[in-house]
Amino acid sequence: MDEIKSVAIVGGTHGNEFSGIYLLRQWEQQPQRIQRQSFSTSTLFANPPSYEANKRYLDSDLNRQFSLADLDNIELANYEQSRAKAINAFLGPKGNAKTDLIIDLHNTTSNMGPSLILLQSDDFNKKMGAYVMQNMPEAVIVYEDQCPVEEQLFLCSITQQGVIVEIGPQPQSVLRQDVLDQMEKMTLLILDFIDAYNSNTLPALNNYSAYRYKETLSLPTNEQGERIGMVHQHVQDNDFVALKSGDPIFKLFSGEEIYWHGEYEAYPHFINEAAYYDNNLAMSMAEKFTVVL
């Protein structure tokens, strides 16, 4: 892969995920913390109006507006759809971006700990995951490489390389020091990795365990679309803990339990994420695998 020459750190893609927003403010006051020798680093506050409104978004989820078709569709013109086009013009355009890599900072209400979400499984991303893991053993690496990056909807898919730093648990519209500190540590490690990659000074890196996204499960609903159950306490807060066939995953308000009967050993994450309730999403499922360098 070509040398990374420009990196953009994005915060506030969702206005009620505060850690990235407050880190941007700190880094704007002390830009030397995010500058590295071999590339330039800029920051972008993605969605200030949603922050002012203390909401995830005003009209639609900004982090789902970056398909090539949607970016080209001038009829998609609500606030976030328009903002996506402006960000794409500023950092991109997608497919021929002037920026080489985006780090998009997010919080989750789920108990995911410090998670790094990678959109590609090329040599660069595999080594990034290894570098972060070796310097931050509490980190979790998740690959969402189920489709080419050009087909991804996320903001960080504007650039040739893009990653999501996802730290939780943190309630919406709240700051937690441990979560903010983990977000800063992971972000600075990514910057250190890029600098070492560019200068061919990476240390020896080891194979490591990671997770690959498989599917998303919905909360149980009736024919009218009303929720009739909730995430089972057996699963709640146990992000990245293996689920085996026959384990309970939902508890219905009637008292009945629903069990996992998948054909693979599943590792749930984004469990009971508050932001996903508008879509009745309960959790994402992943398989565990070994990344071989």
Image (cartoon, rainbow, N blue to C red):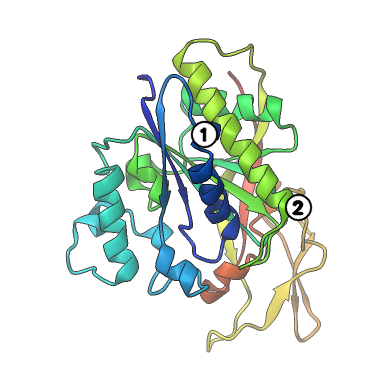
Q: Is residue 43 visible?
A: yes
Outermost bottom residue? 224
- Amino acid tagged 1: Ile
- Residue for point 59% across, 85% down: 222
The spot of residue 271 in percent (x, y) is: 68, 61
Q: Is residue 61 visible?
A: no
Q: Is 284 above or below relative to 223?
A: above
Give the total of numbered labels. 2
The spot of residue 243 in percent (x, y) is: 75, 52
Q: Quadrant of the C terminus?
A: top right
Secondary element under disc 1, as helix, strand or loop, is loop
Crowding near pointer 2: few (<14 within 10 Å), some, many (20+)? Answer: many
Residue bearing the label numbered 1: 34
- Residue for point 67% across, 66% down: 171
The circle drawn on residue 167 is: none
- Amino acid tagged 2: Leu
Residue bearing the label numbered 2: 243
